[in-house]
Amino acid sequence: MKLLITGGAGFIGSNFIRYYLEKHPEDQVVNIDKLTYAGHLSSTKDFSGNTNYKFIKGDIVSPNDAEEAMEGVDIVVHFAAESHVDRSVLDPLEFVKTNVLGTGQLLQTALKKKTKRFHHVSTDEVFGSLGPNDPPFNENTKYEPRTPYSASKAGSDHLVRAYFETYGLPVTITNCANNFGPFHEPEKLFPRFITNLLEDKKVPLMGKGENIREWLYVRDHAGAIDLVLQKGVIGETYCVGGESKTNLEATKLLLKFLGKDESYIEYVPDRLGHDFRYAIDDSKLQQLGWEPEHTFEEWLEKTVRWYKENEWWWKPLKDNTQNLDRSAQESMKY
Ligand code: NAD
Ligand code: TDX
């Protein structure tokens, strides 16, 4: 089997390749990545010498790059995207370009090359925002995206389904909860807070910290995708859930693991269009035999340890998080 991974120098893509090369040493993996601000060859360093692995620097929006990358490929697993909600508030059209047009280009190339499977990696954010007592999202939940990021991911999901219905391209989709783990860009909640605390800086908690997310260790997400590749039904979507925490609960755990008190929390003005709560019913995936192997608290502590021990990876990326806060977002308001 030869797999094409798109966005394999990013957080989840690099963790997926690491997992896949270990689990399927007989298969070949090609990684196409544009190396945007979020793509780092340092995240692929430990497996870049594997003889079954090849890297192509390329842009999924480019027909030539997509065609070169998909040469002789059996399965595409599509991670490449603009992925940070705060950036999408500031530069929405970049998200439309990569997430919608880029996915369209890959689908068109997969159709031309008669690729055996196109797996699309998506997010629970396409379903919108839940109130405190609403039932969790599942595969039949109506799409109600509320940010440029989630709207562009929703657009990509619709295109993937359209290529199945219209042309019969063999697709599957996963919509996953928030991931955490090693090689996570320091602009996102956990790595931003962990690295701030390691530098003895305060952590910027939006609003009152009451927003709720489900969290899944990134290797469990990789396992879920692998399972869907093996056992998933063509044309179907699978939701992937995690463990539910308010941002304040999660922040307090990080403070505990790093030996800091609550004076390190700085409450900052809220994100524009901030979704209140995500929650997922993943019983459809469980019916395929899925269960996560990593518990939240234990693996959050191990993730903290990883950041302590791998300053070489995150230190050079820390400046990326500047100017993404509410004051920059305010200037975009109507
Ligand atoms: P990330 O931002 O860490 O990585 C994205 C990667 O895509 C980067 O390596 C970047 O260089 C690459 N890329 C961007 N534009 C490209 C282009 N035009 N051509 C080629 N490569 C390009 O993102 P992530 O957190 O690893 O997320 C990966 C996927 O998983 C995304 O599709 C995201 O929507 C989805 N997802 C993420 C989460 C999460 O918690 N992070 C949860 C559910 C779903
Ligand atoms: O500095 C911060 N302070 C803060 O309070 C940051 C970066 C975030 N937050 C809050 C906002 C959210 O309620 O923490 C929560 C998580 O924020 P992010 O890490 O930006 O993640 P989220 O917006 O939930 O989106 C993530 O999960 C779903 C990924 O970035 C998406 O790519 C994925 O689809």
Image (cartoon, rainbow, N blue to C red):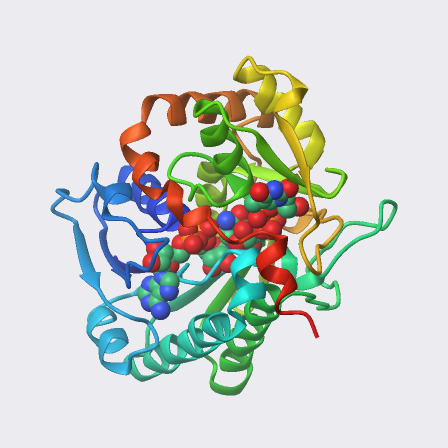
Task: Pick the quarter of the image with the N terminus.
Answer: bottom left
**Residue 176 seen in the current view:** no
Taking depth in this image into account, of 49 and 182 the one nearest to the observer is: 182
User: Of 154 and 137, which appears nearest the observer?
Assistant: 154
* Looking at the image, residue 169 lies above or below residue 11: below
Q: Is residue 112 left or right of residue 217?
A: left
Rendered location of residue 267, percent (x, y): 69, 37
User: Could you say where residue 104 lies in the image, as x and y percent from the top left?
Assistant: 43, 79
Q: Residue at x 27, y 31 (%)?
A: 312
For image coordinates 45% across by 34% down, the residue present is: 181
**Residue 120 placement (x, y as % from top left):** 47, 63
For this rendering, which residue is in front, 265 or 50?
A: 265
Tell me where residue 317 sits by quadrant. top left
Residue 325, position in %: x, y?
Answer: 58, 51
The image shows a total of numbered marks equal to 0
Q: Is residue 103 above or below residue 197?
A: below
Side of 223 relative to 284 (left or right):
left
Which residue is found at the position 29% from the left and 65% from the top?
74
Residue at the location (56% across, 40% down)?
189
Query: In the rendered view, does 281 fall on the left or right side of 4?
Result: right
Q: Is residue 209 above or below residue 231?
A: above
Residue 326 image-quadrant placement = bottom right
